[in-house]
Structures are given as C-alpha cells and as structure tokens.
Image: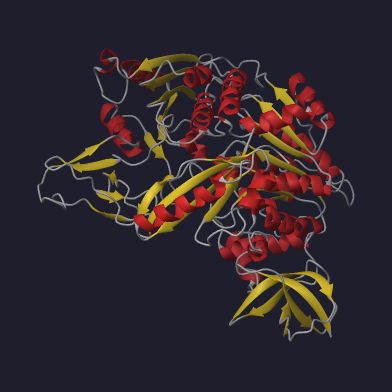
Amino acid sequence: MFFYEVIPEGRVEELTYSFDDSLLPGQIVLVPIGRRVVPGVVVKKVAQPDFKTKSILKVLYSKPLPKHLLKTVKFVHDYYMVPSGQAVSLILPRGVEKQRRKSKTEQMFGITKDGFYPNPFPEDTLKGARPSLRSSGKGFRAPVHDIPMNVAQKNALEGLLKAPGATKLLYGVTGSGKTNIYLKMASRALSEQKSVVLLVPEIALTGQLVQVFREVFGERVVMMHSQQTEAERHLIFDRVFESEEPLVVIGARSALFAPVLNLGLIIIDEEHENTYHQENAPKYSAIRVASFMATAVNCPLILGSATPMVEDYYIASKRGAVVALTEKAKASAVKPRIKMIDFKNRDEFSRNRYFSNSLLKAIADNLEKGRQTLVFHNRRGSAPLTICDNCGEEILCPNCYLPLTLHADDYVLQCHTCGFSEKVPVGCPKCGAPGLIHKGFGTKLLENELKRLFPRAQVRRFDADNKKGEGLDAIYSEVRDGEVDILVGTQTLAKGLDLPKLATVGVVQADAGLSLPDYMAEERTFQLLTQVIGRVGRGHLKSAEVFIQTYRPEHPVLAFAADEDYLGFYDYMISKRQRAGFPPFRFVAKFEITMKTEAVVLRKVRELVKKLSADKRLIVSPPQPAFHERTSRGYTWQIVVRSRSRKVLLESCEGLDASFRITLDPPGLL
C-alpha cells in the first residue's frame, strides 16, 4: 500500500489518499471527496498518515503531466491565493474522467488519427494553399520556403534572441509584420524538438493565425479554445498529451495550459488585451503565469503589441528587454490621413446625427470605387438607455439594476451584464404612461442607419450579438474579398484584421471610454484607437483615411492615437501613474463585499478601512460603491489598497472577514 498527496479539482487543498500501485507526480487520477468523485493530480508520495484515508479509485493516464504544469499549479495557488484545486482546474479539461468514443468524435470533427485538424477552414479560405513541408527524417519537417523577412524584422529577431531574461517585449507598430517573427521563432523551437504555445486575445482571431501557421508547419498546428465542445477539447487534450513530437498550440487564454512536450517558446500576441486576465475564479493573468512558466523551463516568452501595457513596457525597458519594430512590413504602406471631427460642430452633422458629413462622403466615394469602410463604435445594441418621458423612470435590469439596452431588431430590452431580456413594455412600469423613449446609440442602430443611407451597399455588423455562423471568423473570406462594403462593429473589428480593400475607418465616438472610473481608462482608449486606426494604410491601397468623431478633440490621448505615437503616450501616462501612485509604482488590491442591506455593507467596509489604515505601509482609498453597485444579491462596495510591496498587500489580506472578495492586480513582469 502506498500513500499520495493529491490535489482534487475544486475549492480544496491537497488531500492524502492510498493506492495499491506506485504512482508518479503529475499523474491524473480519480478520487472520492465527500459524496462526489472528481479528477485530481498526484503531487508526491508521502508516509502513511496517522488517520484513515480513502483510496484513489482510478488512474486516468499512465503518463504524468509535464513538470512545468505542476510548478504552475503551485505558483497560481501561492501567487493568487486560490485553492490548489482551482489551480488544477486550469489544466484539466472538463469531463477528463469520461470515456470518449474516439472514432465517432474523430469523424464528427474531422480529426485525423494523429489528433490534428487536416483543414480547419473552408476550402475557399485557404485559396489553394498546400502544406509547405518536407520530411527531414524523424525530426521536425522544415518549411520548403524560407519565412520572408525584411531588414527591420531580421534586426528585431536578432534583438529578441540577444535580449536578457526569459520575458521579452516586442513593440511592433501595426502592419510591421510581427507574425513573420513569430513564425521564425516557432521554426527555431521546433527544429530543437521543442513545442510552442501561441496565445491570441480573441477566439475570432484564432482561425486567421492558424491558417498562416498551418501553411508553414502543417499538421503540427493544433487549435484550442473555449468554444470547442467538451468532447472536442478532451480529445485534443488527449492527442497533445500523448504526442511524442513537438507541436504548435494556438488558442485563447486557456491554451497556455496545454500539456505539450518539452515547452520551448511562448508567444502572447496583442499582449495588452484585457482578455488575458481571467475574471472568474480562479482569477489570474495569463501574462504573469506565462512569465513564470518561461522562467521555470528557461524558454523565451515573447509579448507582442503595437500598444504594450504601460507597466510591462516600463519593467521590460528597465531590463533592456524591449525590442522595437517600427517600420511597416510593406514598402507600399502609407500613413493614414486623420481628420478629428468635433461632435459639437453641428455644421459637420447636418445630414445625420451619428455620421459626420465628411465620413458620409468618404463612404459614398468608397462604394463608387469598390472599396470598403469600417465603422467602429464600442457599444452594441440599438440604444443603451430607455426612460419614461412622463416620470423619468429608467428601465433597469431586475438582477443588476443597470440600464437595459434596446435591441431594435428583436424589439427586446437586454442586460449586457447578466443576459436578462424582456420585450419592450407597452408603457412605463412605474406610472403606466405610454411615452417610453430610447436614448444613446449602439452598433445595431448604426447598422440600420447605414442601410437606410446606402440601400445598395452590403452592410454587416460584427459584435458579441452575432449568432453562430454570422461572426467575422465564419465569413472572413467574404469580408477579405470585398463582398461586404461597410463593416460595423465593436472591438472585434479593431484587432488583427488585414483587409486589402479597406480604405476608410470611421470612429463614431472616440471618447466614450475616457470618463470611466478606472486608472486604466485612458490607456484602454489609446490602445483601442491605435488598433482600429492600424486597420488601414497597410500597403494594399495608395491612400487611407480615418475620421475620429469626438466631443473632446483636444484630449491628449486622442492626439497621441491619431499620430500613432505610443512613446509619447507612454511618457504622458507613466508620469501620471508615478504622481498618483498606480502601477507600475505600486501594487494594487481590491477588496469587494456584497451584503443584502446597504447598512450592513457600509459597516463592514468602514471596519476594514479602519483596520487597514492602521498599517502605514498601505494607501487605503475611501470606501466606494462598486461599478455594479446593486444586484439581486444585494449591495456591493469596494476598497482599493495600494502598496510598494506585494508581500505587504498579501499580509493585509490575512484574517479578513470571509465575505470579502480580493483581487490582486500586480504590476510589471515577473
């Protein structure tokens, strides 16, 4: 009889179990916990305890998980103060204990016996591309053609190879060809028989990047993301886990935990995106975890972005680990002509309240010349506010107490926080008057307005309201080939698109995010504007133009974005952060609590403020309502605490009322 420390999946820590056979650290097993049976991971062999133990029920895999994943579980547990069982849930696919009928699943998903997608795209997407591989014996099958690189890209590649430390920041302007550098780095890793993990911020962008990588590396490229079914993700996990050859795994945040053989390179594209931060339990930053992984296995981590996080650029530059790629990849690339349009200038909006005369003229010219226009607004729906014209009552979500958004196509009111929806009331729920009015505008309204203004144009909207088969990933080839004249959408359209016929970008309300109560509001606005401006001027057309509509044309953040001046923005922002004591100069923790009554929540937050303020190493903000103050669960208030030491912040979290939820937001790289 042997005894083992096992981490069961769930909100639990390590537990001791017995088993008749010898096991290795990292093996995945099935264990009883209470009345449930859950998967778990063996940590280590231990001496027989002086208490009665339950037995491991089944060994699910004879092969142990890679060592770097076991180290990562411990890191997430220690660094983010989450139960070990929640950290393990990041690694194990849901339903890992189930027996899959693999032959049927392979047939359903078109997966070969080697567990990979022979062609994950429609035939017209690949446009006749052939797998460009040749056999070189048992090792990696090298590409037949070399990966093309200009002088600037070659210099950047050399800089990355020479930069100190594991984590390196590739600051590359939009259209500079960062993907070619990713391909070259991946090729080097595979030739050394090491695997590659490449993260992208959006599942919708995964397909485009997989297409590029498959054209070079063929069947070694595996796609993993959360929109795959449980059975599909389990099958892919099995194939990656069992593979004896190095692979390239591409996917969103969760792909970081793929059980690859001999991890040799991690790439995080568009590293500034907030989708790399998981908000539900266990909360973690994929960038922080990837930095730990890279250090643990001594492999490079490449963070690529045209607008890197301010704290990441600050830390990386201090280490000499920033590599700049500031030239456009194509010599034919042009700088877009930027026109800032003041929403307060009514002469510019004499034809339409949403679109300036200048933007409408550009759209009409593009339609005549067979070119595309992208209209960007980072708010979906038709109208974000519905109120009674008689008594002023706002129509709110019964769960979140936030304004419901009108979706005019289905004529429903919907909450974009919890998903609640209802038909638009005939009259005011409070006074009964029929005079409900809808204020503000979203992408659905803009889509309908453009269809009215340009009835012969093909207008398509791309946002989170797209149904399956309607999203950008589903019809990317049609969009790329110019079959859509006007694209309307949210931040989905701002990232990673390279459309040959796109001539004009119109930003409907550029300052919409500047006033949010968040120290990162200006940074997010700059990043989003820079990304969407970068969709044009990429070398396909001789000219490009961008119209930025705003109520605040004098704001410096808009000026920096219009000039594509990241370094100017960085200097402006880092100075503000230093004066205010925000990351990267302080570590930040947020304490949130929800109670049924406002009186109780106020009493508890005031008690915590008094306790924390006694420690002079902490900067404690006054208690304030959370962004979503009132929900069906009660009232939520928060306290923001800052310190120069993360250790001090961790100490402040000890012995607190269990009702408080704690979010640590550490600045800088590891």
Determine whether 498 is above or below 252 in the image.
above
Q: What is the tally of numbered marks visible in this picture?
A: 0
245 displayed left or right of 347: right
Q: Quadrant of residue 111?
A: bottom right
In the image as oriented, which residue stretches furthest toward the left? 433
Q: Residue at x 49, y 61 (%)?
A: 659
State which quarter of the image contains the C terminus.
top right
Q: Is residue 661 left or right of residue 102?
A: left
The residue depicted at 26 percent of the width and 24 percent of the height is 353
> Front-most of 653 and 86?
653
Give left or right: position of 171 versus 446: right
Residue 607 in view of the camera: yes
Q: Residue at x 27, y 18 (%)?
A: 349
**Residue 562, percent across and down?**
50, 18
Q: Residue at x 79, y 55 (%)?
A: 68
Residue 142 appears anywhere in the view: no
Figure quadrant of residue 624:
top left
Q: Identify whether 13 is placed above or below 253.
A: below
Quadrant holding the N terminus: bottom right
Q: Quadrant of residue 94?
A: bottom right
Q: Position of residue 641 (x, y in %)?
A: 56, 43
Vertical order, 656 against 332 (above or below):
below
Measured as percent of width and height from the top left, residue 478 is found at 48, 37
